[in-house]
Amino acid sequence: MRVGLLTGGGDCPGLNAVIRAVVRRGLVQGGNSFVGFRNGWAGVLDDDASELTLQSTAGILPRGGTILGTSRTNPFAAGEDGAARIRSTLRGREVDALVPIGGEDTLGVALSLHLEGVPIVGVPKTIDNDLGGTDVTFGFQTAVQIVTDAIDRLHTTAESHNRVMVVEVMGRHAGWIATYAGIAGGADAILVPERPFDIEQVVAHVRRRAERGRSFSIVVVAEGATPLDGMPRSRAATTDAFGHVRLGGIGVWLEEEIERRTGFESRVTILGHVQRGGSPVAFDRVLATRFGVAAMDAAAANRFGVIVALRGTQIVEVPLEQALREPKLLDPGLYETAELFFG
């Protein structure tokens, strides 16, 4: 079997571990070869690819990012039908199965191709942990650790200067990173997309702490969080190839509002792409490896139109349609636990 791989959407710690595992599993099985398409779906559209071998994938397990490169290319953007170009590339490269590694957009393209007969086995990837088909995605634990480390550091400077520190983290639709890292870092308020917030309640938390002699506060906010008045979350009018508005700026707004309403000196830290970078933590390396092995096994058995997923402690196969039916939003019980420590 000849297997094609691509990584699409935002980069993520653990992508290289998946690539390594697919190749290693296929070579151990014997009779398999691999081609890696560069820069996501763009590489398949443009037939831009290179061979993946034991040598070319050696030593990449701990590396962040992706050796294949990535992009947010949408083969079906602006009414285009990229399926014919993709099928032509796969035929020319004699690819028997395609393994796209990505989030809801990359896998959404994969679903469309599967419905047109392209043999697909998907691997779910997002640091936001908001894909419905799997309990956990690789990259999430790394992002949480990065944010937790940042909060720990901000605690010391906030206390030294008697400041309110606002920490903006990733999370367009779901507040998993904000809540996990907020709990782990001892945040005094956590604001998430699932729950529009009342700025007056946030201010009241900060004031209560000051009244108790706590002269600083840490507020963690996901980029997709919104106040009750529905203030736009976007800092730019442009959208990407999948129609997503570029987020960012809610932290700046919060910093200004908290300082204006309380008089307390406030500062914002936007962690941004720092959360995506660097080496994956051990959990993500193991999960990504398990996903890669399972994806190759599914392809070898001609079980297409699925993603590999973590359910409990087991790796299972989930139909693409089911995996993409709806996003996995934050567990309300987890947020209620976090609320016990607000203010």
Image (spheres, rainbow, N blue to C red):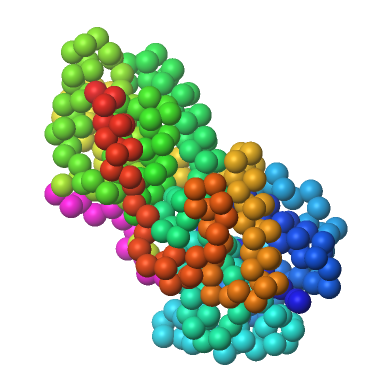
Percent from the top left, x then y, of residue 296?
A: 68, 65
The magenta segment is 229-243
Image spot of residue 100 (x, y percent): 59, 68
Q: Residue at x 34, y 52 (%)?
A: 329
Rendered-image quadrant of the C terminus: top left
Depth order, front residue of 61/213: 61
Tell me if 300 is positioned left or right of 319 in this view: right
Query: Could you tell me which quadrant the N terminus lies in?
Result: bottom right
In this rendering, does residue 273 appear at all? no
Say left or right for 195 vs 15.
left
The image shows residue 259, relative to residue 31, as above or below, that is above
The residue sitting at 63% across, 39% down in the picture is: 282
Residue 137 visible to the viewer: yes
Q: Of 269 and 329, which appears nearest the observer? A: 329
Residue 11, how many percent across, how many down? 57, 55
Residue shown at the point (16%, 26%) measured from the top left: 204
